[in-house]
Amino acid sequence: MASYTPMIQQYLRVKADYQDAFLFFRLGDFYEMFFDDAVNASQELEITLTSRDGGGKERIPMCGVPHHAAPNYIEQLINKGFKVAICEQVEDPKLTKGVVKREVVQLVTPGTVMEGKGLSDKQNNFLTTLTDFGDETFGLAFADLSTGEMHTTIISGPVQQLINEVYSIGAKEVVVEDSFPESIIQMLKERMIVTFSYEQAKTIPQEFIHLVDKLEQEKLLITVGRLLHYLKRTQKRSLDHLQPALFYELDHAMKIDLFSKRNLELTETIRSKGKKGSLLWLLDQTVTAMGGRLLKQWVDRPLIKKDQIEKRHEIVETLMKEYFTRQEIRELLKEVYDLERLAGRVAFGNVNARDLVQLRKSLSQIPSLKELLAGLPIDMTSVLENMDECTELTGLLHDSLVEQPALSVKEGNMMKDGFHEELDKYRDARRNGKTWIAELEKRERELTGIRSLKIGYNRIFGYYIEITKANISTLPEGRYERKQTLANAERYITEELKEKETLILEAEEKIIALEYELFLKLREEVKGFIPRLQKLAKAVSGIDVLQCFATISEERHYTKPSFNDERKIYIKDGRHPVVEKVMDSNEYVPNDSWMDRENEMLLITGPNMSGKSTYMRQVALTAILAQIGCFVPATEASLPIFDQIFTRIGAADDLISGQSTFMVEMLEARNAIVYATQNSLILFDEIGRGTSTYDGMALAQALIEYIHDKIGAKTLFSTHYHELTTLDQELDKLKNIHVSVVEQNGKVVFLHKMKEGPADKSYGIHVAELAELPKELIERAQSILEKLEATPEKVNIPQVREQSKDPLTQLSFFEVKEERVPNDEKLNKQEAQAIAKIKKMDLLDTTPMDALNKLYEIQKLLKTKK
Ligand code: ADP
Ligand code: MG
């Protein structure tokens, strides 16, 4: 190290503290990177790698970016999950001898971005921290640095819950202790792009003590402490906008685990991982960015308390009816700026006068907004109470700032006349000077008779008198002092003009300095309002989301759901909200869903692409919409309140990762089986697909039986194993339904309509027939199918075996109506007689002895050879 130049030595000293980040080292107008950072950055950012002599034996790899372009490059690195330490010169190079002092002023990390494309308007950017307390107990805290909100909880029990929660928060960065279990880190990394950072401290930094007043548990304090220390260490600036940490409990919301959220495409689609096409996309009729963020939080966390849900429904219903009020509310909200993020930027000190003017504009909407809400025909007190107009602040901003202030805070032109006496004085001086100049221009024109004479100003020469070449001959010799010659004009000055210029410029300078000072003072005052602004922001976002629900419910003809305590699902003419929207609602075929304690499970069969998956999801999404407080896509709906929803897709159908294996499928199924209660909703979509037919089918059946006997959760189970449709004879709470299909003009048409009973089984062969495959081939397929059905021994499932022996299961595709029609030809005479005998028996009028006798008779009949 000793042989390196002093600057490189300084670099290495700084870098030692920031091993996990790219160090942007300020050198004049550039941020330079050296050594490995340079090599890696040049690849990541596609910039040229050079080298420089650093005093050592070998040249040092180097690359750099101009300082004005740095935000762009930093953002690229952050989006790739890296961190960037920004090291600035903290002394004026002109005033120092030797190496200028440099310090890291900020560590930018994926969880702490404050601006730029990395920060989406309608999404929170949560920095998360985890603490392992042993015994499967974890502390979790997360904060959004841009809005200042902070939440914390304790999660005990299986790690899966923790993973689900971190996923649902959408954490981009997770801060842990060195000793945090590597296995969990790996699990998280497998499922999402997440950067891990380390922070050992677990106390609460002194200046943040007030943020944790309300936290009672030691574990929460330790967890939040780590988060705050990390923020302090990385940000090195004012964090006055951080809000007190709010404790929440997982059990206070409907639980939807990671797989289910993905499968149901709640906030992003499976294919593109984007918002478009998701439930959130469909719903998002919010007007403000903060409303958009709150909507996402609500979708991620449906409520489970009936009174809370009904409160939302009540407001939505009212807003839906009060069409004009709702339109007016929307208009007002359009003028409301992102108050939460603004508060964050006020704390950081990076707002300008234009931002504050927008704040003023936002605040001035609040009284009208409150008036509209108060006029609604329901009690809005609880909402109105939280809507603080911040009247003093509005007044202050009104008195101080002009309508259209300058973008830069160092150019003046921000403060109103009359706001500050001294400022007014300088402005007078400047104005007088300018009037004097205007008069001078007029006077000189008259005196010289040159009508085109004019007085101009530029930064280099200051004020000048300009006379075109054509008029110079008429100008009295020596009247002005020549200053500059242009192609077709001469520019002059006079002693007097220069004197005034000095006065004007001095006034100008003072105005700029004073306005800047006044602005900083104003900004400090706004800072004092941050907590009130944040509270207001929450109230406004809430109204925004509720008007969004009303808007979407009206637009898409949703209906207000009711809740029952009998664990009954009754949905009339239900639709899948997103599929319906995407496909133009006229084509969507609505379907009813009817489940109760006698019908806990639906076994859904039907050909591919007939609408099984859509139907199942439609039920889950309806439940979620209801529980976030929105209306639902149906003409009538009565639902239980679900505590959890599980959605699983068989591996072969799993488009999500492409890497999904049968093991994953089973792991996911296991979670549902272990955690579901009778108040849960389970969707199993073609589970068991990922393995060979018989063991997949065996597993599917065992799953159905287990849920049926042990859990009693409402379950929709779609399957391509037709053998399972006979299960309804064993399991009394299981009902078969199928998707109806018809043939029209030689084509198979999916009606997407659910019907009772199992689907036809030889559907595939019929489709092949319609597709005009050779007759011979079709016949061969038929006979193979028959043979397969006649030799069920390979299937090791008792019920299936029993049933498959029964030739009645072979149903002809186009004959399927409501009831199965026995194919008499395949029964021999004795069998037909036996069945007839059984059918004729009147069981109510039969003694056990009679029954035994009859049975003996029937058996004898069947044993006789044909
Ligand atoms: P399956 O799971 O039976 O293979 P899907 O549920 O994936 O079938 O549905 C296939 C396609 O059929 C969907 O993408 C959708 O376009 C259409 N579809 C499904 N249900 C309906 C419906 N009720 N009305 C109209 N079209 C539907
Ligand atoms: Mg499907």
Image: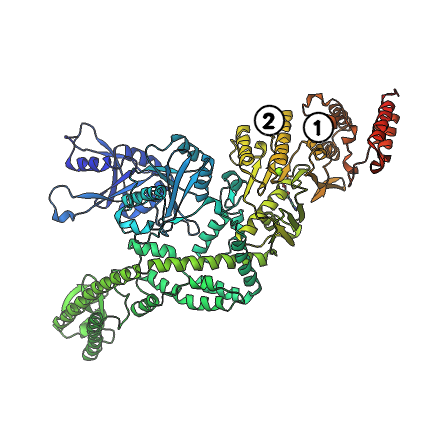
Q: Quadrant of the C terminus?
A: top right
Q: What is the count of numbered marks? A: 2
Question: In the rendered image, which residue does mark 2 sit on?
Answer: 691
On the rendered structure, is 324 left or right of 447?
A: right
Task: Estimate the x, y position of residue 213 in percent, counting from the top left.
Answer: 33, 51
| Ligand 1 quadrant assignment | top right
Return the disc, 2 or 1, that comes first in the chain's sequence.
2
Does residue 350 appear in the picture of this structure? no
Query: Is residue 783 something that shows in the picture?
Result: yes
Q: Residue at x 43, y 55 (%)?
A: 290
- Left or right: residue 777 compared with residue 338: right
Q: Secondary structure at mark 1?
A: helix
Query: Which element is circle 2 on?
Result: loop
Residue 394: image location, x then y, percent: 35, 67
Whether pointer 2 and pointer 1 mark residues with C-beta atoms closer than 8 Å, the reply is no
Residue type at the position of mark 2: Thr
Colour setting: rainbow
Query: Between tags 2 and 1, which lies in front?
Result: 1
783 or 329, which is in the foreground?
329
Residue 799's label in the rendered image is: 1
Amino acid type of the residue that numbered disc 1 sits on in the rendered structure? Gln
Relative horizontal placement of residue 383, taking residue 555 as reference (left or right): left
Q: Examine the image and state in which quarter residue 413 appears.
A: bottom left
In the displayed structure, 291 sits above or below 760; it is: below
Mark 1, residues whose alpha carbon is within 10 Å: few (<14), some, or many (≥20)?
some
What is the distance, in whole Å, between disc 2 and disc 1 at their CAs? 21 Å
Q: Nearer the viewer, residue 733 or 515?
A: 733
* Quarter of the figure that contains the N terminus: top left
The furthest residue to the top: 865
